[in-house]
């Protein structure tokens, strides 16, 4: 195995392993809620709605990871250690500013959410109880986005993985202990509140670990910096570029949220059975993304490093290797979905009607890896190159492509039931194809052009 392949695997595998720990937390939270003495259905509903509120809240700020990662990778390539330190300082500083704003608007935010989310009074009460506790983790949660991006930019996905493992492991441990208590200690647990409080403590545990990791492993990057150096991180062209990159990435995040919200809103119109089928399909689609994102992060780190030293030949090689690994994973998942897709569906539900309804959508699942892989891979490469204007434009276009296919199909064909669901998946595919083609077309100009 040549050096580039070894480097790709060194960077990708920790990210893949970290991604695989993410579903565990959600499953444990639901399992804990489901084993409390009160109504399990209402408690699980409260967790689900509360988690949705945070998904909508935090997903908008994914640029903290991507922007910090791309700019740090380029500074790493230039061996500009002051700028490496400055990128983390700017990222964490912005994270705390945003977190403070979120704490200030928590009440109107929850009011806005429940204008669109319908649920029983009991579920709403539990969701709000969960929300008002967990929102105090916002400073740690947003700061950790910047830390994860910084670790990736510093070519150290292992530290990013360790941070995720600490956060997710602590989340499981604290949620169980705080909910049910500790036998023989006199602490009988906090009940439902313990789940949310466990998440808060886990996020701050992760922030403490990430800070210590930076101090111990990258002390040389920060060791020679003075207070004046930290002040200069927020002055001049660097902060202007930082906000320019993150502004574009914020627009991209909003576009992705629009498509995902449309996924939920449109599939809910199909009735309970087709809604369940579409939800299962989405869960299975995400399994593939856990693997391909690892190579996208590797591509991000290496692209940024070679853009930083203005080395177009190595950028091209990074693109070739990243696509080679990602598409290879895609082919493997085509086979996995083709052979085991229905078995996976049966693991997620025992309802025979839902299983049979989902069978009709299997072709969409089988070919999803090959259709989506270029879009996911380009995202990592463009992030590393901080070619965020092109990313922004591609995502605006892909939202338009999604709704164009959906609305035009509804107008011309007026499909109902399963046929409408097929049209929905066609629209979802259209948005992925648009992203892939647009970023492929712009690659030479947007990424290679500035460094030639």
Image: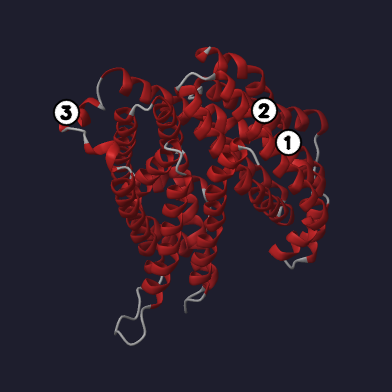
Left or right of 170 on screen, residue 349: right
Q: Decide which of tag 2 and tag 1 comes sooner along the chain.
A: 1
Q: Quadrant of the N terminus?
A: top right
Residue projecting furthest to the front: 2
| 57 vs 230, nearest the viewer | 230
Left or right for 292, reference 407: left
Q: Which residue lies under the disc numbered 2?
A: 436
- Asked where in the image residue 357 lies, by quadrant, the reply is bottom right
Residue at the farthest left position: 227
Q: Position of residue 127 (x, y in %)?
A: 44, 59
Residue 204 in the image: x percent, y percent? 32, 55
Q: Could you give the CA–CA distance between mark 1 and mark 3, rounded to whole angstroms?
A: 49 Å
State the image coordinates of residue 247 (x, y, percent, origin top left). Answer: 42, 26
Helix, strand or loop at label 2? It is helix
Q: How many C-alpha atoms fall within 10 Å of the one at disc 1: few (<14), some, or many (≥20)?
A: some
Q: Which residue is painted at 40% across and 48% down in the image? A: 110
Q: Residue furthest bottom?
A: 184
Q: Which mark, residue 371? A: 1
Q: Marks 2 and 3, Cα distance to the nearest angstrom?
A: 44 Å
Q: Which type of secondary structure does the marked residue at label 3 adopt?
A: helix
Asked if labels 1 and 2 touch by Cβ distance under 8 angstroms, the answer is yes
Circle 2 crowding by C-alpha within 10 Å: few under 14, some 14–19, many from 20:
many
Say which of 362 and 259 sits in front: 362
| Residue to which mark 3 is pinned | 228
Q: Secondary structure at mark 1?
A: helix
Residues at marks 2 and 1, CA–CA distance in whole angstroms: 8 Å
304 lies left or right of 147: right
Up/down of 88 relative to 339, above or below: above
Percent across and percent down for residue 258 are 56, 35
Vertical order, 22 against 36 (above or below): above
């Amino acid at each position: 195995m040549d050096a580039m392949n070894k480097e790709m695997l060194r960077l990708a595998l920790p990210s893949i392993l970290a991604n695989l720990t993410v579903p565990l937390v959600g499953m444990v939270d639901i399992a804990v809620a489901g084993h409390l003495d009160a109504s399990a259905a209402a408690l699980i509903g409260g967790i689900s709605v509360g988690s949705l509120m945070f998904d909508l809240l935090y997903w908008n700020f994914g640029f903290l990871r991507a922007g910090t990662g791309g700019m740090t990778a380029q500074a790493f390539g230039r061996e500009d250690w002051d700028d490496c330190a400055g990128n983390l300082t700017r990222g964490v500083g912005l994270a705390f500013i945003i977190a403070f704003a979120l704490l200030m608007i928590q009440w109107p935010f929850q009011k806005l959410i429940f204008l669109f989310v319908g649920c029983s009074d009991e579920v709403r009460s539990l969701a709000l109880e969960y929300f008002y506790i967990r929102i105090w983790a916002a400073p740690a949660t947003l700061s950790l986005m910047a830390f994860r991006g910084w670790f990736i930019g510093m070519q150290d996905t292992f530290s990013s993985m360790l941070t995720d493992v600490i956060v997710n492991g602590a989340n499981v441990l604290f949620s169980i202990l705080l909910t049910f208590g500790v036998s023989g200690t006199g602490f009988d647990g906090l009940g439902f509140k313990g789940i949310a409080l466990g998440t808060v403590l886990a996020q701050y545990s992760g922030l403490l670990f990430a800070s210590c990791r930076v101090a111990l492993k990258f002390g040389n990057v920060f060791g020679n910096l003075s207070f004046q150096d930290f002040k200069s991180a927020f002055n001049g062209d660097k902060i202007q570029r930082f906000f320019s990159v993150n502004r574009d990435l914020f627009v991209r995040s909003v576009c992705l949220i629009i498509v995902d919200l449309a996924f939920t809103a449109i599939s809910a119109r199909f009735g309970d059975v087709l809604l369940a089928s579409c939800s299962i399909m989405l869960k299975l689609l995400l399994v593939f993304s856990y693997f391909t994102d690892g190579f996208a992060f590797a591509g991000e780190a290496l692209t940024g490093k070679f853009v930083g030293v203005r080395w177009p030949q190595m950028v091209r090689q990074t693109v070739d290797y990243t696509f080679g690994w990602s598409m290879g994973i895609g082919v493997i998942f085509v086979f996995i979905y083709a052979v085991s897709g229905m078995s996976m569906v049966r693991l997620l539900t025992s309802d025979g009607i839902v299983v049979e309804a989902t069978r009709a959508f299997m072709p969409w699942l089988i070919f999803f890896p090959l259709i989506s892989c270029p879009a996911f891979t380009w995202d990592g490469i463009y992030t590393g190159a901080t070619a965020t204007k092109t990313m922004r434009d591609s995502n605006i276009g892909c939202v338009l492509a999604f709704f164009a296919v959906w609305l035009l199909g509804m107008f011309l064909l007026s499909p109902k039931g399963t046929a409408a669901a097929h049209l929905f998946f066609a629209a979802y595919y259209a948005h992925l194809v648009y992203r892939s083609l647009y970023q492929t077309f712009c690659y030479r100009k947007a990424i290679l052009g500035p460094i030639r």
